[in-house]
Amino acid sequence: MNRISGDTLYVGSGTTYSFTVDTPEDEGLVSTGVTVEELLYQIQSKDGSVQHYALTESDGKTPQTGGLKNGDLLWVTDENGKSPKKYVIQLQPQAVGGVLEFSRNEMTTKLPGDLTVMFTAGQRTPDATVRVFIPEGIHVSKENVWANVIGRGSVKLDDLEQQSIGRVGTDYPYSKVGTVQLEKNAEGQTCLVFMHLDLRPSNGADLEITFKNVSIPKVGEYRFHASYETSEPEKLKSPGIGAEQKTLIVKNEITDFTRIMDKGSWPGNTSNYTNVSFRWSPVVSRKILMECSTDGGKTWLACPAKMDAKAGIAKVSGLEEKREYVFRLNVKDGVHQGYSNIARFYSGQLDVKKFNIVADGIHDNTAVVNQAIEYLHQLGGGTLLFSDGIYSVRTVYLKSNVWLYVNKGATIKALKGCDEPEADWFSDRKYRSGLSPTDPKPYDDPENYLTKQDVGHTYFRNAMFFGERLDNVKIIGNGRITGDGNLNTSDKVMNNDPGNRADKMFSLKLCTNLEIGGIPRQEDLWYDEKADEPYYISSDGNASIDTENMLNIDRGGHFVLLATGTDSIFVHDTYFGKNSTSNVRDIYDFMGCNEVTATNIYCKVSSDDIVKLGSDCSLGFTRPAKNYKVRNIIGDTNCNLFQIGSETADDITDVCVDNIYVLGANKAGFSISTNDGGHVRNIHLNCGHTGAIHSRSKMYRTNTPFFISISNRGRVLGANVSRCKFTENGTPHDELLCTNVNIGEVENIHLNGIDCYEVYRGSSFRSERWKAFDGSQRKASPIVAGYKLPDSEDVEGGLDFRLPNGKHTGYVTNIAFTDVHVMVKGGNPLEDSESNPPELGVGQYNVKNLGVQPSYGLWARHAKDLTISNSSFNYENRDQRYAIFLNDVLGATIDSVQMVRPEGIDNPVKFIDSQRIKIKHSVYYNDKWENLPSKL
């Protein structure tokens, strides 16, 4: 509602696009106008008196449902149904009003501090203009004000036009995140005018504006207001009233007295709950006292504290456990004399059962759990204890600074009926999943970010636990969390009925400081082959079989954890599949995340990747990923134990992995696949960068131990494809080629200290544990495969495009295998040594797409600066392929390598179109290991 003028009530009306997963592709245009029900619900008397409201059409008929129309009548009567007054409804074109919020509602005069203003538009739109009016008295410049647009990251206003828009193809229309101007009006206000913002993605607050080190000289009320303008499907402007207005209170007293939250890893001791620390902006005063209350602020007592008033910090110790405290400062003199704002603290783990929950596994506990989390959030944070019992939940809303502790005897299990996938500006129906070399639909709209990754990555709210733009969240304990068969694993999940579309256990989006795991232990986790169980390596080197500290998770759906755009993550000490191995695909999926540590993880078996790093377009933009430390990962999978890709829309760099134990992997033990133009750099396996190497990494029953590859699928914003017919090695192809996204790069890959045995597709997923090789299972060699577009002369009609950087071959560069030993099953005939695998392409970027390799050991194509040293390649049964096959390898060193030359092969190492190959200190055996060694 806009305003009332005389007997006319002006109401906003407009349209926008909003697609649910059920909306047909041509029916996403919806009205944003107020309905009859909404108007009657929202309207209220200005003075608080009781009134009754009724709506009629102009002809006197009473509409019960549907949208308002011009000329409808609103009838208002008093509590006795008398004194009627009539208002005529007049619709006006208008955008849905937005919401303006502050990070703090009060500030202290003359004390410098940061203030963050958050604005969220009421409807989605491309090419938006947002105006934020800053009251006089608050200093504004492009140097002291920072902006974060749709979660892209905070930059100075001066740098906004230079901020990266992410990795895109040349068909993407945006070249900037946006522009900003500062304008002064007659009232002394400064207006920040943000233009050309793409507000179609919905990632929480659309605009976070932070005023750094602001000092406000006068006490008073400072009113901010904002509005925005849409460009599609029609040009509309929001009213700039109601929730688009917000008042900041500035007073003399201290207003930023805040409890200091612990953001380190789980403390593991109760003293964390009987001690509490605070901070505030220091003030000049001869005496400052700490006061506390245990009755909600009714009575106050002096509270002994270790205080450094000059630094503005204090610590209170020796609190009574399991009590709610309220604290404040009492400034005895000076400009800031008086009581500060209050800070709350609960001195213990707050048992969720205090909220009268029934933990019997039958009752739906969702509302009570969310109530308890919100209660702790309003206290400023704390730990919510799930004591012994079975807690059934649908979608739990995580909150900043609230930690969940799952006790040994507690189980949290999912119910059907989690939240539905969120509505969006775009429809995702053109692409939800699948691998096709000829399907152009993911590329039909270069701006549609929903069609650039599989559907599981696209939506976030259809989860058992959900959080967006949060900080400092932990889920810790040695109890159990289970999807209980109610979290889906299928890519066709959106075909299910509403209420049965949840496919994630934990879904975290644009968060910071996340921890999920058991009770932390410093020892390294490893694996006992005979017991088929993990154990910890104690300080004396012996096996500690007590793993009762581990968090137990099972039946996690498509993703146990989907973390997107989330930084500072610590996952640890978790046992997957102890109670059940069904209903689980990916374990950890980190999309565009930074500063991630994963350690002491055991997965009995999963149907997809156990640890996966990537970067996609699901946020509406791409985000690079950097700085990973992964250690002590043990598991069996139908896919890859460790995977970079396949979503590689942006760069992934600086990844260190130590001590992996692959029990089975039906794709690869260690996989790197850049497919969408991303650069993958500085990847280390068993180099000791995460800590001391306690064991050699081991790989058993892998389809291939290593799959290092490049393709040019190009699923990024602005990508385009062309369907081409061409011939490759005499084989006709009819498939898509990406025409305007550069081929990705893989470089600086260091693989050390690894033993590979039983190289075949031998995971126990949906099979016995483990089925021995019988010749029917697929098997592949260790693979390094760059990518090359077809030559123009091989393409029907010629190759009619040139990639932006002009490079039509993507090389894997500077890759080193050191102390790597591979024992394959063997048995391939001589004719397989002549095989020539096809190039990887759109929809064809997996191991199986390469068919049979011409070598039983390493096969490398399109590589530069390859090093193999102190390594060996052997077979169990005679394999009449080459030991090493290099095709288009520009620079290679083979140093101190042992291998077997099978009968029928003249030389165990084969080169095609390769240059600068050095071989030294290497030997081969004739037909079988240690038989007639010869210098290579």
Image: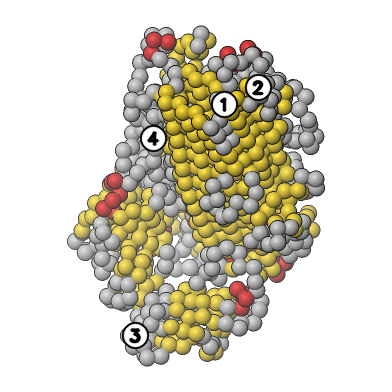
Identify the secondary structure beneath mark 3: loop
Characterize the local packing of mark 4: few (<14), some (14-19) or many (20 or more) Cα atoms within 10 angstroms. Answer: many
Q: What distance separates the C-alpha of mark 4 from that of mark 3?
A: 53 Å
Identify the secondary structure beneath mark 4: loop
Q: Is residue 918 above or below residue 92?
A: above
Front-most of 399 and 230? Answer: 399
Q: Tell me the amino acid under the disc marked 2.
A: Asn
Q: Tell me the amino acid under the disc marked 3.
A: Val
Going from N to C along the chain, the mark reached first, 4 or 1, is 4
Q: Which residue is mark 2?
A: 926
Going from N to C along the chain, the mark reached first, 3 or 2, is 3
Q: What distance separates the C-alpha of mark 3 from that of mark 2?
A: 86 Å
Labels 2, 4: front one: 2
Image disc number at residue 168: 4
Determine the residue positioned at 74% across, 40% down. Answer: 582
Labels 1, 2: front one: 1
Horizontal and vertical percent position of residue 608: 65, 37
Q: What distance separates the C-alpha of mark 1 from that of mark 2?
A: 11 Å
Image disc number at residue 284: 3
Q: Which residue is mark 1?
A: 935
Horizontal and vertical percent position of residue 819: 58, 39
Q: What distance separates the C-alpha of mark 2 from that of mark 4?
A: 52 Å
Characterize the local packing of mark 3: few (<14), some (14-19) or many (20 or more) Cα atoms within 10 angstroms. Answer: some
Q: Is residue 733 above or below residue 80?
A: above
Horizontal and vertical percent position of residue 34: 46, 47
